[in-house]
Structure formats: C-alpha cells, structure tokens
C-alpha cells in the first residue's frame, strides 16, 4: 500500500499517530480519576472480589503471588494494596465460605418439609 497509494499511506500513518497521542493522554487522566475515588471500602471490595475470583473460578492460590497478577492490579489501581496471603486464606476466604454455607442452608431450609416427607411408591 505504501508504494501503490502513497497518499492513503500517509493519511493512515497520521491517523495512527493521532490515535496513539489520544490514547496516551486519556489513560493517565482515567487513572488519576480512579485514584481520587479510591477508599477503604473500595479496598475491601476489591480484596473480596479477588477472593471470590479464586474460589468460584477455582484458580490456584498461587495467583496471589504472581508477579503478573500484581502488575495488573497495580496498573488498574495504583493505590490498591493486596492483602497478605495469610489474611486472604485464613480470614477472608473462610468468611466467604461461611456466607455461602449459610445462604445454602437457608435456601435448603425452604424445602426441608418436602425432603422430610415420605415418598409414595406408585408401583
């Protein structure tokens, strides 16, 4: 295309340069806005969501130690501090387990009467 349509090639190069400038300027502004809105409540929520991700998607627990995972978190939210491994696996995940267990018990409690009734054999 560069040789066959030099004018179109030039336009394409200029538009790609413009797009790069726009994207580079937009990302830092966006990060700055999210940094200002980051609170302790948000910190807790993000930590809990990471724990849910590990539990429900059956991810290996070593993801917490992954350099790439930490890098992703740092890029998405520079102010976020990942909780230590012991806190995640000894405090937060057991709480998630208890919440899930209690929800399941209350759900099954609604059907307890149905489960306790003897079933009739139709044969």
Image (cartoon, rainbow, N blue to C red):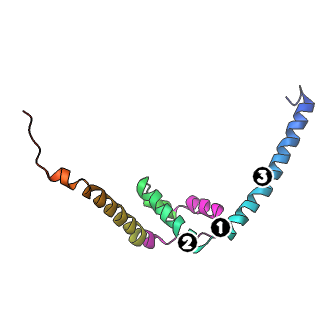
Mark 3 touches mark 1? (CB < 8 Å) = no
Question: Residue 103 location, x and y as percent?
Answer: 34, 60
Quadrant, the C terminus: top left
Q: Which of marks 2 and 3 is nearer the N terminus?
A: 3
| Mark toward the start of the polypeptide (3 vs 1) | 3
Horizontal side, residue 34 vs residue 84: left or right? right
- Residue 39 part of the magenta-drawn span: no
Percent from the top left, x then y, of residue 95? 38, 68
Determine which of the numbered discs, if any, sits on residue 90 in the image. none
| Furthest residue in direction left, as rendered | 123
**Residue 72 screen position, x and y as percent:** 61, 59
Dominant SS of magenta comes to helix
For marks 2 and 1 on the same chain, the one whose residue lies earlier in the sequence: 2
Query: Splitting the image into 4 quarters, where does residue 32 fall?
Result: bottom right
Residue at mark 2 to residue at mark 3: CA–CA distance: 30 Å
C-alpha gap between disc 3 and disc 1: 19 Å
Q: Pointer 2: what residue?
A: 41
- Mark 3 and mark 2 in contact (Cβ < 8 Å)? no
**Count of labels in the image:** 3
Task: Say the numbered circle drawn on residue 78.
Answer: 1
**Residue shown at the point (78%, 55%) measured from the top left:** 24
Q: Give the range drawn in magenta.
A: 66-88
Badge 2 crowding class, 10 Å Cα cut-off, few under 14, some 14 to 19, many 20 or more, is few
Q: Which residue is drawn at 90% across and 36% down?
A: 10
Residue beneath the point at 85% across and 42% down = 15
* Residue with the mark numbered 3: 23
Q: Is residue 100 above or below residue 87?
A: above
For mark 2, give the secondary structure.
helix
């Amino acid at each position: 295309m560069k040789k066959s349509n030099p004018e179109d090639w030039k336009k394409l190069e200029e538009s790609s340069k413009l797009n790069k400038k726009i994207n580079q300027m937009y990302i830092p502004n966006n990060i700055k806005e999210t940094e200002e809105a980051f609170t302790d409540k948000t910190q807790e929520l993000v930590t809990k969501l990471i724990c849910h991700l590990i539990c429900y998607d059956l991810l290996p627990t070593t993801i917490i130690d992954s350099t790439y995972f930490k890098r992703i978190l740092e890029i998405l939210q520079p102010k976020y501090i990942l909780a230590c491994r012991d806190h995640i696996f000894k405090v937060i995940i057991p709480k998630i387990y208890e919440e899930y267990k209690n929800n399941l018990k209350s759900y099954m409690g609604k059907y307890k009467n149905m489960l306790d009734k003897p079933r009739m054999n139709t044969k």
